[in-house]
Image (cartoon, helix red, strand yellow):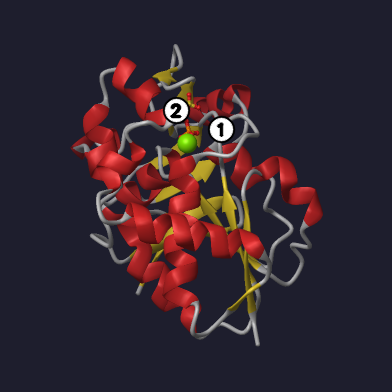
Amino acid sequence: MKNIDVCLTPDLLHQYELENKIVVVVDILRATSCMVSGLANGVKEIVPVATLEECKALQETGYLAAAERNGSKAEGFDMGNSPFEYMDEKVQGKKVAVTTTNGTLAISKSLKAKEVLIGAFLNLEAVTNYLKNKEEDIIVLCAGWKGKFNLEDTLFAGALCHQLKSDFQFACDAPLAAEAMYLTARKDMIKYMEDSSHAKRLAKLNVKKDISYCIQESIYDVVPYLSGKALVALTT
Ligand SMILES: O=C(O)[C@H](CS(=O)(=O)O)OP(=O)(O)O
Ligand SMILES: [Mg+2]
């Protein structure tokens, strides 16, 4: 039977073989929620880059540039890292270059995979449907926070493992633990996440509404996937 595994932070990714696998990158707060929202709301393509310099270089060639460090918009860029910015009229039909503290770094470490997909609660069902009949093994890569474990990405990993458990076997205890966390948390996701370090960081930045938005399940049917250097939308 095919396997599904969870890598709890990009710093552990060296333990995983990516070749011939599908990697689902997740950064619930907030990079992958932004990517799903943007592509579902008319953004043409999104180019994720690891550094501010790469993002600036793309801005100079005409991309709208979204850049975030430590939760805030970096100086000199067009957008930060709030999903609401990705739904603004000004980004419709545009190409966006993006760099964030954790999410785009995780994507840049996944490039050896056969396919790289973007997951978020917002497109949970669409990602599930896309993966269900795949023959390849899956790795859910949690972007985490600065190399460390975080709650929100692990909860999504657990949700996806739960959805796929009749088609994929759990490769080790990480999917099992993530699923158990999700099954407890889903009764009241906001409350469960209240104590998370990221919820506290975002509350300080006055963007609490981003959390309530990002934990909504399956409101979009797009699956962003990496085609060359750009994320584009696959509609299920
Ligand atoms: O903008 C975000 O929500 C985070 C900021 S931080 O790393 O938690 O300070 O970035 P992301 O890359 O989306 O995790
Ligand atoms: Mg994050």
Relative to 221, say whether 59 is above or below: above
Relative to 188, say whether 222 is above or below: below
Using the rendered view, name the quadrant where residue 22 is placed: bottom right
Residue count near mark 1 (Cα–Cα under 10 Å), binned few <14, some 14–19, many ≥20: many
Q: Residue at x 21, y 32 (%)?
A: 209
Q: Is residue 43 visible?
A: no
Using the rendered view, name the quadrant where residue 62 is placed: top left
Residue occupied by mark 2: 197
CB of residue at label 1: within 8 Å of ligand 1?
yes
Q: Left or right of 189: which side holds 113?
A: right
Q: Amino acid at mark 1?
A: Trp
Labels 2 and 1: the sequence-earlier one: 1
Whether label 2 touches label 1, CB < 8 Å: yes
Q: Residue at x 56, y 32 (%)?
A: 145
**Picture quarter with the C terminus:** bottom left
Work out whether residue 147 or residue 47 is closer to the camera in this orientation and state it. 147
The residues tagged by marks 2 and 1 sit, at their Cα atoms, a distance apart of 9 Å
Residue occupied by mark 1: 145
User: Which secondary structure lies at badge 1?
Assistant: loop
Q: Is residue 140 visible?
A: yes
